[in-house]
């Protein structure tokens, strides 16, 4: 096995930390939806932001995106950008109708 | 006996028996499974189209009841979009030729490739199952617009599940191609040494991968609303029908480029072969594929100008729509520049490629008319749109599909078809196609709405002209398909490179051996359009 492949092995500490962060973020989502229900749009936006952070953490640490060349990170960022554009345009339609 | 004439085992003879075909992992056999299925569904869809044209021959009832007519145009749309056009070029020619063009022996995930085909077959069964299960096929149109799709008693759920399953087939094919292109190019072949068909498949695959999940979840939301009464799109239970249209077109507009980009890739392969020179503006054509795929994500709202979307959103979508014309015209100019001063050999595949440019120009320019806000108010949901979309999908992708079939026929089957018959079929198809669809553009400008069972007497003449065009079109298609079918069985043996092709797939035998190449292919100096047999280049 080459040295380059060896560095793809993540530590248990990193896996555990990522997992704990995901659990914490899940609790945050539940907390906002239960206790922040009256905030309506803001609570939905918070849930979406938390979900995006969670997906990024999974991609970056669990799916080893952090070891990949820059081009793959750019691809992922582009995909995320597309999703943000979809949300912005649909929201723009709603608030200007 | 030279090395080139030594006997070898073709991929047809590598294994025998029906099981070896149904569970094959060879990309070429999977491609042929798709081809036979797709042609079958194309004929079913075309038959439904003929029924519609017959019904519209006179105002009032001709052959079917209004409700049946609604079901026919829905099934026609679902079959033609999801079972024919979207998978046509990527699943058939992409599967067969991508590994050949990249100089490798198969796609990255052969088992996933076979799984994609089986998902396609299962999706097709669901689509056709609506004919016999429940209250008949959906009558919503292929767009399944809410809230009607939530309320109608027809079998929308099964149609939607069909589209959902077919979507997964499309996603997996796209994923397979992206990994194949990134990982399996022959040594020395960088992205800028890839043939343009591979570039177009790469751009298409990204759309398949990123846009298709959106339609998947949207269609499941329709099922959730129908089955569980969740208020998502139906305003009577708290939903928003415009939200459905947003989500539907976020996929379905990029899907137009799933149909068009591979067709453009095929034209980019055919033209240099028959102009006997390297392609003009390689990088411009390659990058314009990516640009079309990218910009294509931002224009979905132009399908919704009259749906109650806000003014500011409509302005933005209209401006973005016009941007797509730029990379598209870059391609057209470069194709024409390739032909300029080329040693042009007019043969059947080139005729189809030239017809693609002609038809696609009409389709594209009528698209710009639809993209203009003011004009769209008049033309939205009229026959103008039906004419426009058929010029893009059939006149563009359909002609490119048949062009590719004639171009790569000798490579796939190792035989040659009757060129006179092929040219005659092409000529009558082009004439019939234009007689069939151009009257629709006129009818739309006159104000005839689409999806209507009946019409005013002043629309009769052009409807009858269009129906006569459908007879010419379908007769030509029968001649075209029978000619190829006969050639595949009894045609004369074709040489390995009958057209003097200058790309990699023509460097191997016809039909190709199981492993595609005897030895690792090398990239020639001057790029992927400079293999031996080019009479002139640059």
Image (cartoon, rainbow, N blue to C red):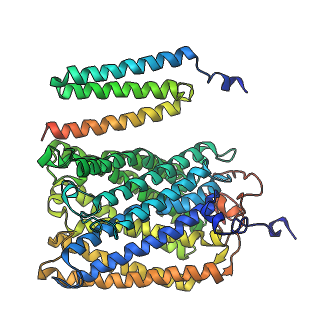
Q: How many marks?
A: 0
Quadrant in which residue A90 is drawn: top left
Residue in the foreground of this view, choosing between B426 and B358:
B426
On the picture, is B253 further left or further right than B293?
Answer: left
The image quadrant where one finds the N terminus of chain B is bottom right
The answer to whether one can see residue B163 in this image is: yes
Quadrant in which residue B439 is drawn: bottom left
Residue B397, image x, y percentages: 43, 65
On the picture, is B349 further left or further right than B208?
Answer: right
Q: Is residue B12 shown above or below A10?
A: below
Tell me the residue at 31%/45% (across/down).
Answer: B298
The answer to whether one can see residue B272 in this image is: no
Tell me the residue at 18%/25% (across/down).
Answer: A37
Tell me the residue at 41%/66% (across/down).
Answer: B396
Residue in the foreground of this view, choosing between B355 and B537:
B355
Residue B399, image x, y percentages: 45, 70
Quadrant in which residue B383 is drawn: bottom left
Q: Residue furthest right?
A: B1
The image quadrant where one finds the C terminus of chain B is bottom right
Residue B191, image x, y percentages: 58, 44
């Amino acid at each position: 096995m080459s040295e380059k492949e060896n560095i793809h092995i993540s530590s248990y500490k990193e896996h555990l930390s990522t997992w704990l962060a995901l659990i914490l973020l899940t609790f945050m989502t539940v907390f906002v939806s239960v206790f922040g229900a009256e905030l309506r749009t803001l609570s939905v936006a918070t849930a979406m932001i938390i979900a995006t952070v969670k997906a990024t953490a999974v991609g970056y640490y669990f799916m080893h995106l952090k070891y990949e060349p820059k081009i793959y990170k750019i691809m992922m960022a582009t995909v995320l950008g597309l999703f943000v554009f979809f949300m912005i345009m649909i929201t723009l339609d709603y608030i200007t109708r | 006996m030279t090395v080139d004439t030594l006997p070898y085992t073709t991929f047809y003879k590598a294994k025998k028996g029906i099981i070896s075909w149904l569970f094959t992992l060879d990309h070429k056999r999977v491609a042929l499974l798709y081809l036979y299925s797709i042609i079958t569904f194309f004929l079913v869809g075309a038959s439904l189209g003929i029924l519609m044209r017959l019904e519209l021959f006179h105002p009032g009832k001709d052959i079917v009841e209004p409700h049946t007519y609604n079901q026919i145009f829905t099934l026609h749309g679902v079959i033609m979009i999801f079972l024919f056009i979207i998978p046509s070029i990527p699943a058939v020619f992409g599967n067969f030729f991508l590994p050949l063009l990249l100089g490798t022996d198969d796609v990255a995930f052969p088992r996933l490739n076979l799984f994609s085909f089986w998902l396609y077959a299962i999706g097709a069964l669901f689509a056709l199952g609506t004919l016999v299960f429940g209250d008949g096929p959906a009558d919503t149109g292929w767009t399944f617009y809410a809230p009607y799709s939530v309320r109608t008693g027809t079998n929308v759920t099964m149609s939607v599940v069909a589209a959902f399953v077919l979507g997964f087939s499309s996603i997996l094919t796209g994923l397979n191609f992206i990994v194949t292109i990134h990982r399996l190019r022959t040594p020395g072949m960088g992205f800028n040494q890839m043939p343009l068909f591979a570039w177009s498949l790469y751009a298409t695959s990204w759309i398949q991968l990123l846009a298709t999940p959106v339609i998947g979840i949207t269609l499941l939301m329709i099922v959730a609303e129908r089955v569980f009464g969740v208020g998502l799109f139906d305003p009577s239970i708290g939903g928003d029908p415009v939200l459905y249209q947003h989500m539907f077109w976020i996929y379905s507009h990029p899907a137009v480029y799933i149909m068009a980009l591979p067709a453009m890739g095929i034209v980019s392969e055919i033209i240099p072969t028959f102009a006997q020179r390297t392609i003009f503006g390689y990088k411009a054509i390659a990058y314009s594929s990516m640009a079309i795929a990218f910009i294509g994500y931002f224009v979905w709202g132009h399908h919704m100008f009259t749906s109650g979307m806000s003014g500011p959103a409509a302005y933005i979508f209209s401006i973005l729509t016009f941007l797509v014309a730029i990379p598209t015209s870059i391609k057209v100019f470069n194709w024409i520049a390739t032909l300029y001063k080329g040693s042009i050999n007019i043969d059947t595949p080139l005729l189809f490629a030239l017809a693609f440019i002609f038809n696609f120009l009409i389709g594209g320019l009528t698209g710009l008319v639809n993209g203009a806000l003011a004009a769209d108010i008049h033309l939205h949901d009229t026959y103008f749109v039906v004419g426009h979309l058929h010029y893009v999908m059939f006149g563009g992708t359909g002609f490119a599909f048949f062009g590719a079939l004639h171009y790569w026929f000798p490579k796939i089957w190792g035989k040659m078809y009757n060129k006179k018959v092929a040219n005659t079929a092409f000529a009558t198809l082009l004439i019939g196609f234009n007689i069939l669809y151009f009257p629709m553009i006129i009818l739309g400008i006159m104000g005839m709405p689409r999806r209507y069972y009946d019409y005013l007497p002043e629309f009769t003449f052009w409807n009858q002209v269009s129906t006569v065009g459908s007879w010419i079109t379908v007769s030509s298609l029968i001649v075209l398909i029978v000619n190829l079918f006969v050639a595949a069985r009894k045609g004369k043996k074709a040489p390995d490179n009958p057209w003097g092709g200058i790309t990699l797939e023509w460097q191997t035998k016809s039909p190709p051996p199981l492993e595609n190449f005897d030895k690792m292919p090398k990239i020639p100096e001057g790029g992927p359009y400079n293999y031996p047999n080019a009479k002139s280049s640059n």
